[in-house]
Structure formats: C-alpha cells, structure tokens
Amino acid sequence: MKKTPRLIGSILALAAVAGAVAVAAIVWRPAIAAIEPPAPQSFDSALIKRGRDLAAIGNCNDCHTVRGAKDFAGGLAVPTPFGTIYSSNITPDAETGIGRWSEAAFRRAMQSGVDREGRHLYPTFPYDHFTNVSDDDNRALYAFLMTRQPVRAQPRENQLSFPFNQRVAVAGWKLLYLRHGTYQPDATKSAEWNRGAYLVEGLAHCGACHTPRNSLGAERTQASFAGGDVDNWHAYAINSQSPAPVPWDADALFQYLRHGWHPDHGVARGPMAEVVSNLSEVPEGDVRAIATYMAGVFGAPTPDAKRRGDDVLAQAKSKEAPQAVAGNTGGAALYAAACASCHGTDRGPPYGGINLALSSAFSGPDARNAANIALAGIRPVAGERSPIMPGFADSMSDEQIAALLDHLRARFGKPAWPNTTDIVRDARRSRTASLQTPPSSDATKRDKP
Amino acid sequence: MMTLQVNGQSHEVDAEPETPLLYVLRDDLKLNAAKFGCGLGQCGACTVIVDGKAVLSCVTPLMLLEGKKVTTLEGLGTTESPAPIQRAFIEEQAAQCGYCIAGMMMRAQALLQRNSKPTDAQIRAELELNLCRCGTHMRILRAVHRAGQLMQTADASPAQRRTP
C-alpha cells in the first residue's frame, strides 16, 4: 500500500512526459534551413509560366497584394472574427519575403501551413485547401514566386485577441480541421471533372468564401458551398441551394468565370471580381474544368426550378412594363427614374445592365450585395474590359436606397428582407473604402512574365 | 411643380419627379454647362455638385433633390469673373473640344472643396469616371493642381467676391 502514491506519481510523471511529447509532436515543427536566394535564371521558363497560371487560379495576388502597391509584397489587412491578419510578403526578398525559402519549405507551407522557421501559419492562408496541391504544381508556383521582383516590405504585426494571438492555438486548430491528403481522382468521372475537382477543392479554394464557417473559423464541411460572408459581401450558395433565378449550368459558369459576366446572371463584382479577372488569363481548359465540376456541385435543376428559370428569362426578355408593387411607390418611382434607363432595356454591357429579375442580388438571403452596388456602383478596372455602373451614395439617402431595393425584391416575388435600411446604413459605413475611389495605376496590374 | 435650388436661386419647375436633373437644367433653366454625353451615368459630362458632392445629373431624378442645393458651373464664376477652377483650366489650356470639361471642373471642384492639396493619384482616381476623348488629361491634371493653389491665394479673390 505504501508504494501506491509512488506508483501513482510515476504514472502521472509518465503521463506528463507522454503528454508533453504529444503536444510537442502536434505543436513543434523544425525550421527548414535557409538558402541563398536562387537566381531567377535557375528556373525553367516553362515552369515559371505554369506557375503564373496556377498562381492566377489560386488568386494569390488578391490577398498578397495591396491595391496600388507592389505585387505580392503582402500587408493586406484581412479582417476576421478573431482580429486582423496581415498577409505576408511572398516576393523573393531575402529579409522580408520568402527569398531564403527552399522549395521544401514552400511545399510545407502549402501542405501544412508552417513557415520556414517552423511557425504555424494562420488558416487565413487557406492551406486547408492547398494541402491538396500536387508537388509538381507547388514546384511551378515556387518557380513563379521566386522569379518575381523582390520587394523589401515587412507586413504589420497581426492584431489578434487572446488566445488567437498564440500560434500554439493554430496547432490545435489543425488537429481539429486540417485533413492532409493529395487529390484522389474519381475513376467514375471524366478527366475534366477530376481536373476541376482538384482545382476547386485545392488551389482555387472556392469554399474559402462560398462555404460557411463555424465559430472557430473552419469551413463547415456539412454545408459545403452553402454560401458565406466575406469582406462585407455575401458569397452566394453555389450548390443546390443557389439563389440564382436562372439555374446555372456548365456553359454559363464557364462564360461567367472566363469573361466576368453572363447575360442571364450578370457581372461578377466584389471579391469575385478579382477571381474572374485572374481566370480570364489562365488556360481555357482549366476554367472549363472548374465549370464542369461546379455544375455537378450545383446539381441539375429540379423541373420546378427549371420552369421558374424559364419564366424569369421570358419575363426579362419581354418588353412588358414592370408591374407596380403596392405600398412602395417611392421605390418604384426611383427604379423608373434612376435605374430603368440601363436595367430596363435589353442592351448588353456596357450600354445596359442586366434585367434585375435575373440577378441573384435580389433573390439572395440579404440585401448586402445589392446595397454595396447601389451605393458604390461598379468602377471600371484600368486596362480591362469591365462593367461599369454609377454609384448612388452621393445622391440617394439610406432610406431611398432601401425603398428601391425593397421594391425590386418584392417585384421579383420574393419575401421582404427584414432590415434593408440597416443593411444599407451598415454598407455605407463599412464600405467607405469602396465608396472612395481606389487608386489606379500600372502598379495594380498583375505581374506577367 | 417643384422648387429647385440652383446656384443660390429658387426655381419653380414644372416637370415630372422622375425627370433627370440634367434635362431641367438645360431645357427649363437654360443652364447649358452640364452636357448630355451618354445619358447612362458613364461619361461624367453631366456632373454637377449637389450639397457639396459631385453627382451625375443625367441619372439623378428631380425627386432626389427635395431641399438640396444644386451648383452648376455657371454658379462658380462668369466669363468676366471666373472661379479659381475656371481660371486654372483656362491658364493651363486644359480644354480641347471642351465637351467634357464642365463635368471635369465640377468633379474637381468637389474634390478641392474637401481637399485643396490633392495628390496626382487622388486627382486621377477622382476623375476616373469622367471621360475625355481629346486626350488633354495631363493638362487637366495640371489645371486641378493649379486651381487648388489659386483657391489658397489672393489670386482667387475676384471670383470669391462675386456673390451668386
């Protein structure tokens, strides 16, 4: 009996050691030796070109470039529920970028979210998707990034609340949510579908915006592509719950992703604008593959949804005057006076806007996207063919815009949004950045080898 | 009938509430500085100032102007006594055909009222929505800088003395 306390003590000690080892195994990652920054000439030009296309599919520039600043130099503030994270400098600068990273260090960052020094990276960097990227593709991405102009720029420190400011916490997050594994092709599907699946679930990380997240910021895998909120925009559901008045199919998706708009769906704006801009210059086959895979995720429309879509299209193409909606004469009058000259015609962009009966903005779950666009309009993009719409922030009050949006919502037969005025007010307040004119210069253009 | 405040004066306007402000300015009030370019809010030739902000008058119906103050280029200065922005555009010879220039001046005026020392980048960004097909952009840039300086010096006094 005397020995019992000692035995318990030993067991506890052993357990503590085992626990410490286990924690260390979860948390601790070794540094990977720094290298001399490789000479750009040491990379094969075809590999660099492939890396460029892959980086565009991965939308790397969107987070790693501050608009108007140097390409890939990082520093973009990414707001999260846990605080603000600043994107890192992924130019090959030796001191502030990834110049001293070997390809192995780059690959580890992509596959498991650990930087060269062994620190856990926050999952704002979507390695939960990038873990699927093949070694070959990582080699190409590495070649592309290591041949960019090095920029000396130290991004600001993240501003996170406790305990999220402890990188140890990220190790726990990974234990819960990071599933390693390269893409396993589905032999029952076409090569194109498999290529699309590999890109969508991996490098293109579509779910990062379009899948809702749980309280710890992880994608809810049970609700894949069911729609999410990002940067004060709503990323629509892109599965069977899609609010699109006309059901999407592979051809429409291809046209939209490749050219940034579709006559039955409208234009891609908000954070999606950068995505379609990138996809306009990658190999066409990859965009087709993404469209093919996503068409499967949307699923074939039910006969009911198909009929409703046909009805909406027929209505949009007829020249009938819009029916008035009782109780909101202000909104109807505003639409007739300020919007119909573009949206009530069947002219295509840039001389006309989409018939709003076709727009997901009015069939979506809230008024956010419609409010953003009504306030700020759609600004032209320097050097690109892009849609354009004047904003009405300076000529309409929040109440007037809300009346207008409520009118359109009702006109297209949807139940009223409960809080349109609040959403417009919030959109005006929080989107001040987009209401101001963004700087436009050659520096905002993407780097092209 | 609706009362419209333009350049410090009240006008009784007999027009439907959905009539674009531009039509009333040009057709009823004979204020022809604001131009009809595209009619779609895409070119900026119709820009006027409403309560301090640059607004596209071709897509701004009268119903939005209840109780608001509209300023057109005519309200800034005259041929005899040009406003700083007008002097600056003349001195820099910033107009070629001139069709876009009234809109350019109004948007630049609204910018300078908020920020009298804008940077090149700020001016370019602000005027991005105003199109000029002649290509006097560099002169327009210089003119906006010059106008900002004029507004801060005694040189601006003649135009400032003028009461609308």
Image (spheres, rainbow, N blue to C red):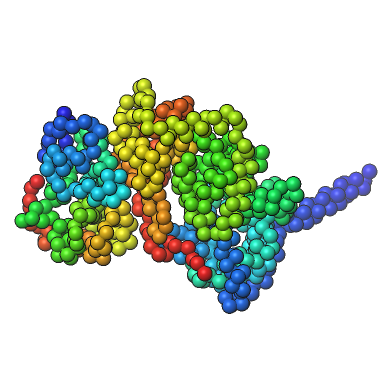
Q: Residue at x 50, y 56 (%)?
A: A280
Residue A278 picture location, percent across and down: 51, 57
Residue A86 picture location, percent across and down: 51, 57
Q: Decide: is A249 above or below B156.
A: above
| Image position of A168 (left or right of A10) | left
Q: Residue at x 35, y 29 (%)?
A: A321
Q: Is residue A274 visible?
A: yes
Q: Residue at x 9, y 53 (%)?
A: B78
Residue A374 picture location, percent across and down: 37, 40
Depth check, front residue: A411 or B146: A411
Q: The N terminus of chain B appears in which quarter of the rendering? A: top left
| Image position of B82 (left or right of A139) | left
| Image position of A83 (left or right of A388) | right
Q: Residue at x 31, y 49 (%)?
A: B42
Depth check, front residue: B152 or B112: B112
Q: Decide: is A82 above or below B141.
A: above
| Extreme-top residue of the structure | A326
Depth check, front residue: A130 or A355: A355
| Image position of A254 (left or right of B107) | right
Residue A169 picture location, percent across and down: 65, 51
